[in-house]
Image (spheres, rainbow, N blue to C red):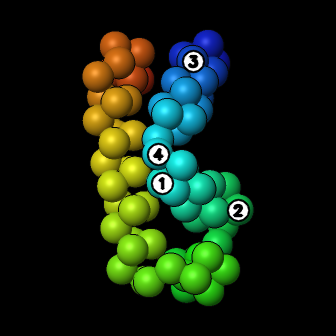
């Protein structure tokens, strides 16, 4: 199980690194640095809707890429 978790983590990082720069930046701020949407808006000077949309698009891409991978599908059934 730990090997599967490690592989999934590596896969997620791989897909995260292949997102467009803005989407990757916002995902890191939101989920790794723990900033709220409002904090990201203030820090980056972006419109609130832009921040929300870019994060939503990035999560959708990550989910689709993860679902394509057989390791991810296996983990969903564990």
Q: Residues within 10 Å of mark 4 (few under 14, many from 20)?
A: few
Q: For the residues carrying marks 2 and 4, which lies nearer the camera in this image?
A: 4
- Disc 4 designates what residue? 20
Quarter of the view holding residue 61: top left
Q: Secondary structure at mark 4?
A: loop
Label 2 – label 4 distance at C-alpha: 19 Å
Residue 7 numbered tag: 3
Mark 1 / mark 3, whichever is N-terminal:
3
Residue that protrudes farthest toward the right in the picture: 33
Label 3 – label 2 distance at C-alpha: 23 Å
Q: Secondary structure at mark 2?
A: loop
Question: Marks 3 and 1: in contact by CB < 8 Å?
Answer: no
Mark 2 / mark 4, whichever is N-terminal:
4
Q: Is residue 8 left or right of residue 77?
A: right
- Vertical placement of residue 38 versus 5, above or below: below
Label 4 – label 1 distance at C-alpha: 5 Å
Question: Marks 2 and 1: in contact by CB < 8 Å?
Answer: no
Do we see residue 22 in this rendering?
Answer: yes
Label 1 – label 2 distance at C-alpha: 14 Å
- Disc 1 designates what residue? 23
Residue drawn at (43%, 83%), measured in percent from left and top?
Answer: 48
Q: Residues within 10 Å of mark 1 (few under 14, many from 20)?
A: many
Residue 33 numbered tag: 2
Residue drawn at (39%, 62%), measured in percent from left and top?
Answer: 54
Residue drawn at (39%, 40%), measured in percent from left and top?
Answer: 62
Label 1 – label 3 distance at C-alpha: 23 Å
x%, y% of residue 34? Answer: 66, 67
């Amino acid at each position: 199980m730990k090997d599967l978790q490690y592989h999934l983590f590596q896969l997620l990082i791989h897909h995260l690194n292949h997102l467009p720069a803005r989407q990757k930046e916002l995902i890191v701020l939101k989920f790794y640095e723990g900033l709220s949407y409002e904090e990201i808006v203030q820090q980056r000077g972006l419109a609130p809707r832009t921040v929300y949309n870019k994060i939503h698009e990035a999560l959708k891409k990550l989910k689709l890429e993860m679902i394509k991978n057989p390791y991810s599908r296996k983990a969903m059934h564990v």
